Amino acid sequence: MLRKLSTYLKEGFIYSGLEISESEKGEAYFLLELKKSKGELLITNKKELTSLDELPSSIQKKHPILLCINTYDILTKKVDFNNSANVEMIVNQAFPNIDLNNFYYEVIQQENSPFVTLSRKESVDSILRRLQELKVKISSFSLGISALANVVPYLEEETMIVSNHEINLINKTIENLTPMEVESKQLYTINGLELSSSYLLPFSQILVNLNKSARNTNFSDITESLKWEFRNFRIFNQVLKFALIFFIALLLGNFFAYNSYHEEVGQLNAAMEATSSKKDELTFLGASVKRKQERVETLSKSSNSKATYYLDLFAQRIPTSILLGDIKYQPLAKPVRENKPILLEEGTLLVSGISKDVNDFSFWVEELEKEEWINSVETLDYDYAGKSTSNFLIEIRFHEN
């Protein structure tokens, strides 16, 4: 799992092979895109470009580009019967008296008959600069037909055609190489994958990368630098993408957590407000109950006095010419008001009614003043209502004890 993740971060699972070829018609560009899935290679795109300027719009820069340079500047020569393991000696045998400081070379190491591919550094560097100007990052490159050594073991044919060469095979090794002046195309089947001859070199270059095949070159430091630069570019972009996704997910998580917390706080605040409101209600009801209790106690206290006894004595001395209208025992001193105590005029009777005889009324008041239980009698109102009747209001103060 870790190895798969490491591969994904470094290069991914989609690979692009690009061949820059040259013929009498000029340069040609063959682009092949393969996807590695479940141990198999699938062709996802193949395209022949007319100009290198079309390349940036035809590729995804996050996928490795594996370049094969196969122009007229590339020279390939077979070395017969060489058993040397020294690569420079093989190159010097193929191209005697050459200054290797000015050339890039790559050797197909075959038993007894290696092939040496050579190119001036200026030509290769010029192509790499063109690609750099187009902001295309090359992961690796090879010269001429060197990458074909990875495909030859899978072919059953004795003749193989690439974009500008015809190659003869004997016992699955390259025997000789012949340049082609007229373009020719042929279909090949490699492990169930059908490919045109135009895309054999890009396919081979991808296999070199996947198989991590050893290569005999004098530019391995350059390819390692290109590979390192591409991997840094890809890792940075992938990590940046994952970091953005992570922070977006984190922000969304925080948002949802905050939203959930905010809703809970809102519910708690609402509950607190409801509780506070209920508390105020209970406080108000408690105060109301207390006031009513005080009223009841006041009335109960009054009821325990001698009110019935005094009222009975008072009723015994009412003349027949007096008609009572209202009797108020311990009337209110002030009107009842909210949140105010109830004040009573204790030891007091307010009596109102109608008198039919003024003399009887006066005699009655005088008799009441003589009673021991009465402290004082005061006439508050006496109005004539008719020829023989008058309305009266008297206040009787008595001894409570």
Image (tube, grey):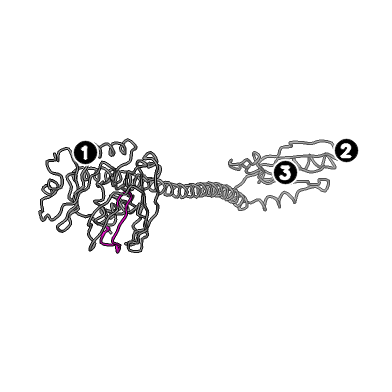
How far separated are the C-alphas under marks 2 and 3?
A: 25 Å
Q: What kind of residue is marked 2?
A: Gly
Q: Earlier in the sequence, mark 2 or mark 3?
A: 3
Disc 1 marks which residue?
121
- Residue 2 in view of the camera: no
Pointer 3: residues within 10 angstroms few (<14), some, or many (20+)? Answer: some
Tag 1 near tag 2, CB within 8 Å: no
Pointer 1: residues within 10 angstroms few (<14), some, or many (20+)? Answer: some
Give the SS element for disc 2. Answer: loop
Residue visible at 22% across and 42% down in the picture: 119
In front: label 1 or label 2: 1
Q: Nearer the viewer, residue 281 or 76?
A: 76
Where does the N terminus fall, quadrant-wise? bottom left
Q: What kind of residue is marked 1?
A: Lys
Q: What kind of residue is marked 3?
A: Leu
Q: Nearer the viewer, residue 69 or 23?
A: 23
Disc 2 marks which residue?
386
Disc 3 marks which residue?
368
Q: Position of residue 215 (x, y in %)?
A: 19, 51
Q: Position of residue 165 (x, y in %)?
A: 30, 50
Residue visible at 15% across and 54% down in the picture: 80
In front: label 1 or label 3: 1
Q: Which residues are drawn in magenta?
A: 151-165
Pointer 2: residues within 10 angstroms few (<14), some, or many (20+)? Answer: few
